[in-house]
Image (cartoon, rainbow, N blue to C red):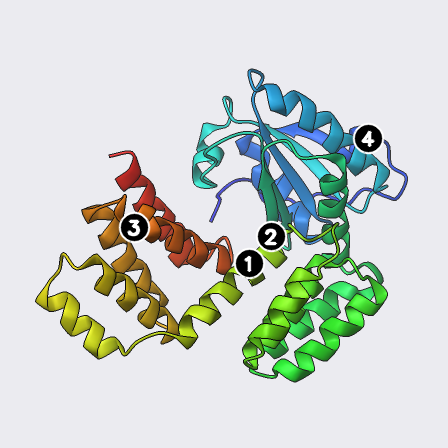
Amino acid sequence: MLGFGTKPAAPAAPGADSSALVKDITERTFMTDVVEASREVPVIVDFWAPWCGPCKTLGPMLERAVTEARGKVRMVKVNVDESQQIAAQLRIQSIPTVYAFWQGQPVDGFQGAVPASEIKAFIDRLTALAGDGGLGEALAAAEEMLTQGAAADAAQVFSAILGEEPENAAAYGGLIRAQLAVGQVDQAEALADAAPAKVAKSPEIEAARAQIVLARQAANAGPVNELRTAVDRNPADHAARFDLAQALHAAGQVQEAVDELLEIFRRDREWNDGAAKAQLFTIFDALPPKDPIVLAGRRRLSSMIFA
């Protein structure tokens, strides 16, 4: 947990001026201005530096979009040169990087300069998540249904949300995942292909697409025991180890699948045109960004790449 400040910040009132909605902060006030404040209103965190060219383009665009949202979101700017500890804790590897916090947790984000349309879609997702019109609560309920195995009920709720907001990326991605949960892979892929242009490249739908790829692989996965025997017999058989990783993932053993793929990369990172690395990214994309498997896997992969 980030151990800074304790006093929550009050949300800005609709129509507040930009100075109340956008501010520069340091790591000393990160807990107050971001984590605690996000329990009242979504907080966008712009990680930047004075020497970063794209930051000079993205920053003003973000500020303008936040001001136009009239208090539904807030924004803070963090100079990574002056706040290296918080940048390290959040694993900021390039700038500009933008995170959105809601209810004390990072819930969305992107890297690099993006067009104004994507910024607007990003802010729209945050206002929906925060319960604008009650949709945030509905999304949370649908996700809980999906977690509990009630995929059909979850699909109905996601569909109802999309009836109110056809371009709600979280609901659209949820509907795709609900189809996957009941084995309707073709229907899930058709939904992904038909996603509205405004949200087609959103993190929620990209994650769903990665899950579709993994679902198709699972349908053709071999038996884990036989593949494990083949790998034990010949540890240099990367094809068998790759097949084992797919079988493990299909069996729900995600961490074990990641371990096998990292072992292929350690032994021969260029094998089969970098297939192990590509498969790792597919698995990472299919999971929540802050999933421990993702965080540890990316860290181990980076250590191998830059060793």
Q: Secondary structure at mark 3?
A: helix
Answer above or below: position of 167 versus 181: above
Q: Which residue is mark 4?
A: 18
Q: Secondary structure at mark 2?
A: helix
* Residue visible at 30% across and 38% down in the picture: 305
From mark 3 to mark 1, how far is it between C-alphas?
24 Å
* Residue visible at 75% across and 30% down in the picture: 61
Q: Which residue is mark 2?
A: 203
Q: Is residue 299 left or right of residue 7?
A: left
From mark 2 to mark 1, how far is it between C-alphas?
6 Å
Residue 207's label in the rendered image is: 1
From mark 2 to mark 3, how far is it between C-alphas?
27 Å
From mark 1 to mark 4, how far is it between C-alphas?
33 Å
Identify the residue at the far front of this view. Answer: 272
Q: Which residue is mark 3?
A: 272
Q: Are marks 2 and 1 in contact (CB under 8 Å)?
A: yes
Answer above or below: position of 254 versus 202: below
